Amino acid sequence: MESDFIKINEWLLPFSWLYGIGIRIRNKLFDIGMLKSREFDIPVISVGNITVGGSGKTPHVEYLVRLLKDNAQVAVLSRGYKRKSRGFILATKDSRVSEIGDEPYQIKSKYDFVHVAVGNDRCHGIDRITSDKSTEDTDVVILDDAFQHRYVKPGINILLVDYHRLIIYDKLLPAGRLREPKEGKDRADIVIITKCPADMKPMDFRVLIKAMSLRPYQKLYFTTLEYGNLKPLYCGNEMKLGEITNKHNILLLTGIASPKQMIIDLKPYTENIFPLTFSDHHRFTKKDIRRLNEKFAAMPEPKIIITTEKDATRLLGMDGLSDNVRHNIFSLPVEVKFMLDQQYMFNKKIIDYVRKNSRNSFLVKTKDDNKSANGNSTGNGTRTISFRNN
């Protein structure tokens, strides 16, 4: 059910009303131009949500990285939530989680060829990315978690909505988990309902399309989660999810907004799932490590520990893990998969936007081709990169 994770604290609704007044005033100031939104001469794609907690931003950002990486120099700009540093920082292979945050660290670790930067001031961050020598080759900037950062006006604004926490059924903070009124979705060019069950029926899609009630200029997509092989954090070999049987006992270690979907997805493999849950972006302590060691030691064999890629970035730097834990802890990679064969339409929209608005090579090719067709170009045209079919 699409609202099964929503809990409204009714007694806090008066405070939500007051909070909503402030947010509506802020949005109105942007709408009438008293607060300014900047446009940039480089393609900018924003990925975000209007709820507190995870809606699958990082897997969707990674999808865009994989879509564009072979034909454009991609830069990802995040605020680096819960990092200990300040100001603008360009990530390197030597950057630490504490410097840039767990999600940027994860992206940089998986896609070293991508420019990854963090900074609270997104306008300043884009200026730095497009002007600094080490990153001035950037063709497209992906803004992570920037739907509400209205000082930047992206070329494509992508809003993610968790299937289990549809914004149309939620309430504003603090009674619910909305960071702004649900009407804020009207700013999106693309709305993606994330974490959908893989076995959704045609009627389910029709109900959601009607319930979301999008504007004519908006396009609605649906994605589900697709898991890769379990990857050992310290030693051992990769393991396929299919190798898990109902004999296995899984200690599911998470520090994410909601592990419920992960539990649902692991249930077909084994019913023996024991969650060890922490808050989103939790910084593990020595006490947490002792608790992990003790809980895992008390579990019967056969047993393994499964954690998320994001949590793995924070665990790898921790001391005190027992040998038993180190030999049996795996991260579970996750990717998004578009449903209803929508990936072709989505990919084309993203690629066409980047191609048409880029300052760099493949835009030059388009112009040169047009000149040649009109007989206004002589000699050899500039050799450039062009997008292939994705």
Image (cartoon, grey):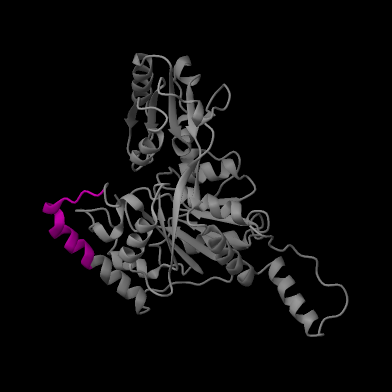
* Residue at the image position 33 percent from the left and 29 percent from the top: 276
Of helix, strand and loop, which mostly describes the magenta segment? helix
For this view, does 194 lie left or right of residue 176?
right
- Name the spot of residue 308 as percent of width and height, x first: 45, 36
Residue 284 visible? The answer is: no
Q: Is residue 216 magenta?
A: no
Q: Nearer the viewer, residue 114 or 184?
A: 184
For this view, does 192 lie left or right of residue 168?
right
For this view, does 35 lie left or right of residue 87?
left
Q: In which quarter of the view is residue 85 placed?
A: top left
Q: In which quarter of the view is residue 325 placed?
A: top left
Quadrant (top left, top right, bottom left, bottom right) of the C terminus: bottom right
* Furthest-front residue in this view: 202
In the figure, 35 relative to 268: above or below?
A: below
Residue 147 visible? The answer is: yes
* Furthest-right residue in this view: 379
Q: In which quarter of the view is residue 82 placed?
A: top left
Q: Nearer the viewer, residue 231 or 289?
A: 231
Where are the magenta residues, as a range? 6-21
- Name the spot of residue 286 as percent of width and height, x first: 37, 24
- Name the spot of residue 258 as percent of width and height, x first: 33, 42
Q: Is residue 13 magenta?
A: yes
